[in-house]
Amino acid sequence: MIWRAAFIWLSFGAAAQAATCEDVRYANDSYTICTVDMASEDLRLFLYDTNDEPFGHFRTLDRSLRANGEQLSFAMNAGMYHDNRSPVGHHIENGVEIMRVIPNAGPGNFGLLPNGVFCLRDAQADVIETLRYIDEKPACDYATQSGPMLVIDGELHPKFLADGTSRYIRNGVGTSADGTKAVFAISNNTVTFHEFGSLFRDHLKLPQALFFDGNISRLYAPELGRNDAGFRLGPMIGTVVPAN
C-alpha cells in the first residue's frame, strides 16, 4: 500500500535559506516553486537515520542535521513509498543503492510508464526516463525513482488528457537541459496531471520533469512560513546549509 494522506500547513520561525521559493499562479492554479542552483547549493536525498529508521518528518530530519552543525533549508517528499516507508522504486543515498530500479509497468501512478529517475551527481541534477537510465547507467550519488514522467524531451506524458478529471495536490521536479538547475513544484490547489505537466513544460520551460506524488505532497520552505505536516513520509529531498 502507498500512503495517500491529507496534509496540514504549520508556521514556524525563519531559517537560513538556500533554495529560492516563491508562490506563483499559472493557468488559474496556485503553485509554490523552489529553484535549486546545483553549482552553489547542497541538495541531498534522505530516507533513514543512523539507526536505519525513516526520518518520517521534516522536523526530525532537521533535528538530525542540526546535531551535526547543519540545517534543512528546503525540503519536499521525493517519491512513492510503502507503508513501512521503504521506497517503491530505485533509491540511492551517498552512492549506496537501497532499492533497485523497477523497469516494468505496474499498478498506480508509479507504474504508468514511462516513469523516471531523479539523479544527482557532480553538481548536476537530471530527470531521466527509466529505460534510458538503465541504458546509460549514470553514476548517481543520490537517486529516486517515481512516476509517471510529467515531461519527456519537451512533450507531456502521452497518457495525460486535457479534459482529465482526477485532481489532487501534486508535487514533482523538473531539470534544465544542462542539469545545472532543479525546479521543484507543489500545487496549492488540486490539479490534473495535464495541468501539472503543463506547468513544467509551458511555464517553467523544462525539457524533463518527474511526478513525485499526489495528496500526501508536502513542502518545507521556511522563507514562506511552511512546514507541512501529516503522516510520516518516506524519501525526502532537500537542501542543506550550515546551522545558524
Image (cartoon, rainbow, N blue to C red):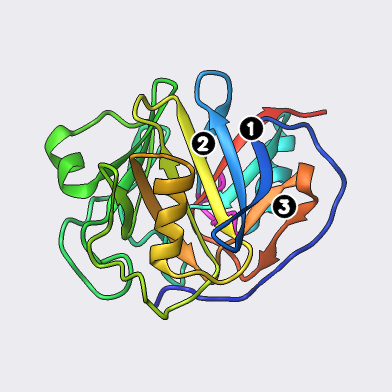
Alpha-carbon span between mark 3 and mark 1: 13 Å
Q: Which residue is mark 1?
A: 240
Q: Is residue 180 left or right of residue 135?
A: right
Residue 55 lies within the magenta run? yes
Quadrant (top left, top right, bottom left, bottom right) of the N terminus: bottom left
Q: Measured from the top left, where is residue 36 in percent x and y? A: 56, 32
- Is residue 40 in sight in this rendering? yes
**Quarter of the view holding residue 114:** bottom left
Alpha-carbon span between mark 2 and mark 3: 16 Å
**Residue type, numbered disc 3:** Arg
Q: Which residue is mark 2?
A: 44
**Residue type, numbered disc 1:** Val
The secondary structure that dominates the magenta segment is: loop
Quadrant (top left, top right, bottom left, bottom right) of the C terminus: top right
Q: Is residue 112 left or right of residue 27?
A: left
**Residue type, numbered disc 2:** Arg
Q: Which residue is mark 3?
A: 59
User: 10 Å neighbourhood of mark 1: few (<14), some, or many (≥20)?
Assistant: many
Q: Identify the residue at horizontal 48%, vertical 53% (top origin).
A: 235
Instruction: Return the residue found at the far right.
Output: 13
Q: Considering the numbered disc 2 on the image, is that residue within a helix, a strand or a loop?
A: strand
Looking at the image, is mark 2 or mark 3 earlier in the sequence? 2
Residue 190 lies within the magenta run? no
User: 10 Å neighbourhood of mark 2: few (<14), some, or many (≥20)?
Assistant: some
The region drawn magenta spans 47-56
Alpha-carbon span between mark 1 and mark 2: 8 Å
Q: CB of mark 1 within 8 Å of CB of mark 2?
A: yes
In the depicted structure, whether residue 35 falls above or below residue 99: above
Q: Measured from the top left, where is residue 74 in percent x and y? A: 65, 41
